[in-house]
Image: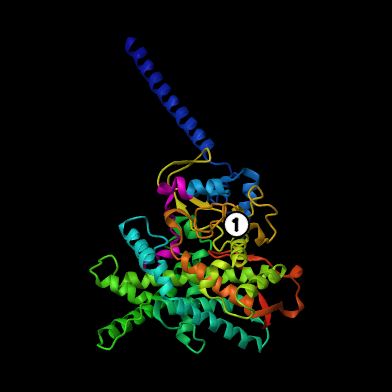
Amino acid sequence: MDLFFSSIASILLCLSFVWISIQAFLSLARRSRKLLPPGPKPFPFIGNLFELGDKPHLSLTNLSQRYGPIISLQLGQVTTVVVSSSTLAEDILRTHDQVLCNRTVPDGVHACNHIDYSLPFLPVSPKWRNLRKICNSHLFAAKVLEANQANRRVKVQQLIDDVVESSMRGGVDIGSAAFTSVLNLLSRTIFSNDLADPSSETARKIKDNVCGIMEDVGKPNMADFFPLLRTLDPQGIRRRLTKYFLETVVYFSRMIDQRLESRRGHEYITTNDMLDTLIDISEERNEDLDKTQVEHLIVDLFVAGTDTTSATIEWAMAELPETMSKAKAELGEMLGKGKVVEESDMARLLYLQAIIKETFRLHPPAPLLLPRKAESDVEIGGYIVPKGAQVLVNTWAIGRDPITWENPDCFKPERFLGLENEIDVKGRNFELIPFGGGRRICPGLPLAMRMLHLMLGSLINCFDWKLEDGIVPETMNMEEKFGITLKMAQPLRAVPSKS
């Protein structure tokens, strides 16, 4: 009998322990869920995928207005936290940058093993630090950019000449003209020659591949939300990106081989372009920068620099009809009417600077930046971002936050003039972060800002513009097309005449 009661007591004790353990687990689960940022209730299996729609930046902005400036969603199997205020963006990009500096990597970036070399997606590591140092010290340093001014001057003048030629046939597709100009400008900076020659089939193919990479990497991919689907590649994104990367890398490989062959000749005169710089670094016994790394780095430079810059110019031109007269007045006074903008003019063109900042505010080129990944649990805004979660910064929402900006939907460059504490785009002012912030800030920022000022200022000063087919600003289609780069859904066409 004593044995019986002892057995019963033991069973009851075990059941009590199991019950207490289950309750503790459930309590912890409930508490953990409560510590997550608020958000819409997920559906089984798919989570909140249907909440995103075809304009995720806008859908997420609407959700933040309902649940607050930090929200959580379940996108398939991926826990995602989105912040939509400058204060919380600072927490992500500065305060907790060390924990949140790595990326969640889209499946498509694994094509051609690009992930093993890609500066934007590599984890913070000695290899990543070496590439950042090369970009900051050798490719985009002020003294290097100063030495290459002549190349940019030539390409801006060519843009103006191309616009004149196009005007004889009718209107100009602003985005396409800007894209071709930026592509050639980057090609001249890296290779000392043009890439987007309309008569070259190879050049057209490379241009299409660069566009294809940007489009497919930016597409919502079921393989990213459900990792078990990666081997199936249900949308064919990795297959297409493999083709784009392979053709582009092979082309750049030939360019590098030609340069290496030329450098072996006794009569070779260094061009001091980016390719010569990268070869010099590679030959200085730098094991982390072999030819394959150089090829993929050049791919990243072209992909990151073309779409973003040309889209910003197109958005700026679309917003300008209301403020064009003020921009032309400043340019005419500082430079003289009809002249191309020089880099030495940029510091004096305060209204032009304000136009570019205001364009970035309303139309950030990367509306959600590139995704980050929590390396451990971290507290943001009083909530827990769990280890492994994807973290997005909604720069589109931050730029239209009525708490920060007066009349946030109005294009008003004057808001950036006469400020006691000047707002810049270098990652120090988190209400305006088109290039990101922290250690992951875009290394090409210095070159991008020079190109934007030169190209946009010259287009404004050298021409008078009117919209094609009698369209007036009030009826212009300003719909957005979401991707890694936020573009105009309907390309902007305008008719220039000599200013």
In this view, which residue lies farthest toward the left?
A: 285
In this rendering, would 390 be left or right of 191? right
In the picture, the quarter occupied by the N terminus is top left
Look at the magenta stretch and give its main secondary structure. helix
The local crowd at label 1, few if under 14, some if 14 to 19, many if 20 or more residues have their Cα within 10 Å, is many
Nearest the viewer among 499 and 320 is 499
Q: Which residues are magenta?
A: 93-113
In the picture, the quarter occupied by the C terminus is bottom right
Nearest the viewer among 465 and 69 is 465
In this rendering, would 183 be left or right of 416? left
In this rendering, would 410 be left or right of 29? right
Secondary structure beneath disc 1? helix
In this rendering, would 171 be left or right of 129? right
Which residue appears at 57% of the width and 79% of the height?
A: 340
Residue 109 in percent (x, y) is at 42, 64
Amino acid type indicated by mark 1: Trp
Asked where in the image residue 471 lies, by quadrant, the reply is: bottom right
Nearest the viewer among 118 and 18 is 118
Residue highlighted by disc 1: 396
Residue 143 in percent (x, y) is at 40, 69
Asked where in the image residue 126 lies, by quadrant, the reply is: bottom left
Query: How many numbered discs sit on the rendered protein?
Result: 1
Which residue appears at 56% of the width and 45% of the height?
A: 70
